[in-house]
Each structure stands twice: as C-alpha cells, then as structure tokens.
Image (cartoon, rainbow, N blue to C red):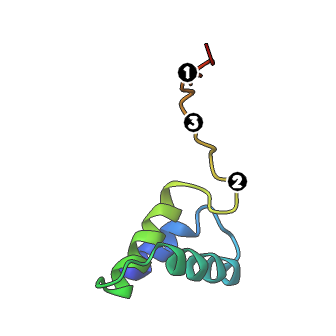
Amino acid sequence: MRSDLVFGALTHVSNRYQLCQLASKATRKLHKPNTRLQDTTNEVLVRFHTINPGSAAPVMQAATQTVETRRAA
C-alpha cells in the first residue's frame, strides 16, 4: 500500500512537506509516457526508502577511454 511506502520514505526525510516536494519533482523527472503516474510515484517512494533523497546523488565515474589521435605525416 502507498501508506507503507510513505512511512518507509519518512525514515530518510523527517518533514512530510519536504517529502511531498521531493517526490513530486522526482516523479516529474522519472515519469515515462504510456505508464501510469501512480506506478511512477510508487517507484519514487521505494527509491526514497532505500536512499536519502536529500543527499547529493553519487557521481558515476565515466570510464576513461584512450583516444587515438592521428598525426599528419
């Protein structure tokens, strides 16, 4: 049920107003066309249960690729 998801997300966010604001922003960014908005909202709340939405997102390190340059002969 969604109430379980909300209470689970409140473990990282103590303020319910802030949780609503963060969840609405995340839902807008993660929503895909042709899917139900309710499903996207539930996914966001599940993510908020596992990670802290107020912290900075972990930066993924881009794989360094060696670029070969051609030199004129």
Q: Quadrant of residue 41?
A: bottom left
- Residue visible at 30% across and 82% down in the picture: 35
Residue positioned 41% across, 74% down in the render:
4
Residue 37 shown left or right of residue 19 in the figure = left
x, y (%) of residue 23? Answer: 56, 77
Furthest toward the top, the residue is: 73
The residue tagged 1 is 68
Instruction: Give the residue type that dot 3 points to.
Output: Ala
**Residue 61 percent location from the top left of the image:** 59, 35
Q: Position of residue 72 (x, y in %)?
A: 63, 18
* Comes first in the chain, label 3 or label 2: 2
Give the residue at mark 2: 56
Q: Is residue 64 above or below residue 54?
A: above
Instruction: From the image, tell me which residue sits under label 3.
Output: 62
- Estimate how packed mark 3 is, as few (under 14), some (14 to 19) or many (20 or more) residues with alpha carbons within 10 Å: few
Residue 42 sits in which quadrant? bottom left
Q: Callout 1: helix, strand or loop?
A: loop
Q: CA distance from mark 3 to mark 1?
A: 18 Å
Q: Nearer the viewer, residue 37 or 47?
A: 37
Q: Distance from label 2 to label 1 (Cα)?
A: 35 Å
Distance from the alpha carbon under mark 3 to that under mark 2: 17 Å
Residue at 70% from the left image edge and 53% from the top image edge: 56
Secondary structure type for disc 2: loop
Residues tagged 2 and 1 counted as in contact (Cβ below 8 A): no
In the rendered image, the vertical position of residue 71 relative to residue 47, given as above or below: above
Q: Residues within 10 Å of mark 1 (few under 14, many from 20)?
A: few
From the viewer's perspective, is the residue at label 2 or at label 1 nearer? 1
